[in-house]
Amino acid sequence: MATPKLKLTMLGTTGSGKTTFLLGMYNTMSLGVQGYFLYTEDPDEGFDLGEAWDRLIEGGELPQPTAEDQSKRYQFVFNHGFDTLVTVEWLDYRGGAMIGRANSASDVAQLRGQLGASDSIYLVFDGGKLTPWLDGKASITSVQKELRIREMTQLVQHAIQDRKRNDLPLPSLVVVITKADLLAGPGRMVWDALTTIIDNLKTLVEAAYVEGVTTLLCPVQVGNFGPTRPLKVDVRDIDPMGLHRPMIFSLMHYLSEGLGAHQAQLTTQRAGQSAVDQQIAALNQGFLAYFRGRRIAQLQDVSASYARAIEDQQQQYHANQSLISRLAAELEGHPIIRNGKVEL
Amino acid sequence: MKIVMLGHSGAGKTTYLSLMYAEMQDGIGGFQVRAKNGSQHSQLLADARAIRSSRYPPLTNHRASYDLALSYNGSEVLPFTWRDHRGGAASGRTSDAEDVGQLHQDLLESDAIVMFIDGHALVNDPGAARNASRLSSHVLRAMRDRPEVSTPLVIAVTKCDLIDISDEKVTEKVFAPVAELAKAVAATRHIVGTLIPVACGPSSMNVVVPVLWSLRFGLIGMLVRLSTQVESSVQAANAAASRVTFVDRLVSWWRDQPSYATMAENHRQVALRARRQLQPLIKPAEGLEEMLKDIQYF
């Protein structure tokens, strides 16, 4: 069976921590997390990501933010053990097109096209930019403005429309809050801040509540680097947390959407088999049945091939179901918004 | 059989190869390994002598291939190729050096993989754990790009004479970087893994185990192939024999085609040849089985 391909696009303003998140996510998952492995199709890309991570781990050197005019595409392979579950095309989109500072309209069209083809969209927000609002020193509108949430929401809504028009499953959304260590404040733990964010998420990120869209709110951090974020950090403060969860969620959602397609295929195959079996039964009626041996044998072959396909489909269905349960266990306690309702 | 070594610079791959060769030259349980190329034989023995006097070979700067053969009680039982790579090949860009791509190709074609991780570095340098874990990606990538064929994977933890492997904290540090890979291997049916602590120095430890463990699978594979051949040829011979008639002999002679009697005889000869090849492998396979019965695998 061909390996499914998941398309994923990451949106966020320059400096939101997209590149550091990607780096931490890759280097955590490439070593294996709970039996899941991620590696690049191209060994050189893996080497570059590893080298950049080493610079951070050994020298405290944070990666340079992706320039506004540079987007980067990665091809990952996502395994459970030695079984390849999915290949992932990951696009780290440059900020320029998103915030309307694209060189041309074609850039915006390209971004919209990419989002329309994405099975999962990550909206990456700098946790540090949320603290003035959490501290009561800034309004939610000013935070939205600074994080360009309105632009992102519009893009997501376009993507949803495109996918609906093309009869494709709606994408999953992950609201990735980077630098999660900064969410804590005077008398406020990270979890308290998250509760406030969940309570206000409908206003803050409207796209998360679109009907039919499933959203994960996921705080992540590479370390406890504090609010000043120097270019060089103290390596003792490196403490990666939650970096693998967005990817786990994307895969879980992708497979869950696929279950419906599996069921539909099963129904079609069962109907096909039943029609063939009825034909066989009709041909077996009466005296002429003796002369229809060849035709009956042909139809019996067709029925047998339907039976094999149904068995394969059922096996795949059950395998995916059990995988979805395992993936869901990894996300336990993380807020997921489904059809406008928060599930924990 | 192709055995490929995978490991970073300084993990002790080349040192291992030389010392393994020297120890297998001395022989163990009737088994010996000999290089087919005279100059490689001399070089490996010279390097091993130096290692035994604590002089270690320089880092390998190129890919090398050794044609070796395992013999049992003086008779060759299994030829094999041993591939050594420059350590940097496991941690470089394909665009920087040709051997980086070659390593992937060799892993794709390998019948056994011996992965080297430096035990001493794992205990003393946090970066070593990351490097060791990254070797997993090479194995995963290679396994994805090839059919599911049975493959032994030995994780050889080198320089174990420099660490206290009886200390639980030490073993934990050594095992942690490959724990996820080991779990993944254990979950497959076609890859069988083992972790062997090795010391290659004046007082060596377990040096012959990685090579013999890998060769055991090669030998078993050969036994299975030959047994299958014997079985299928005997079946084909019997099927042909059951159709032997005087008329068939006559018609075949007239048409200048092999008769069923000839076909049965040809199949019988193939079965006989396969059986002759198979017989001398049984004792060595049993010998290896006995010798390695205490090695834990996952």
Image (tube, coloured by chain):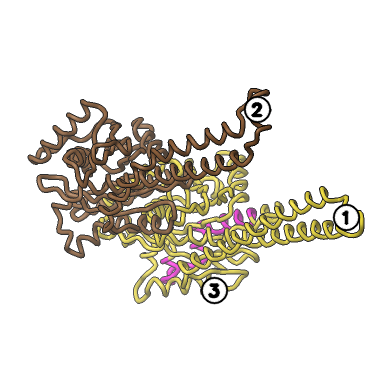
Q: Position of residue A174 (x, y in %)?
A: 52, 61
Q: Are marks 1 and 2 on the same chain?
A: no
Q: Residue at x 15, y 55 (%)?
A: B163
Left or right? Give the position of B29 relative to A230.
Answer: left
Residue A61 at least partly seen: no
Quick check: is A139 in the magenta stretch? yes
Chain letter of mark 1 equals: A
Q: Position of residue A129 (x, y in %)?
A: 43, 61
Q: Residues within 10 Å of mark 3 (few under 14, many from 20)?
A: few
Q: Residue at x 37, y 65 (%)?
A: A182
Amino acid on which the number 2 mark rests in the picture? Ser
Q: Residue at x 30, y 41 (%)?
A: B5
Please say if A99 is above or below A131: above
Are the residues flagged by discs 3 and 1 in contact, CB closer than 8 Å? no
Chain letter of mark 3 equals: A
Q: Residue at x 88, y 55 (%)?
A: A289
Name the residue at the bottom extreme. Answer: A187
Task: Measure the C-alpha gap from mark 2 to mark 3.
Answer: 79 Å
Name the residue at the front extreme. Answer: B246
Task: Measure the C-alpha gap from mark 1 to mark 2.
Answer: 41 Å
Residue at image mark 2: B252
Q: What number is the disc on residue A289?
A: 1
Q: Can you tell which chain is drawn brown?
A: B
Residue A227 at least partly seen: yes
Instruction: Give the magenta part as a residue range.
Output: A131-159
Residue at image mark 3: A343
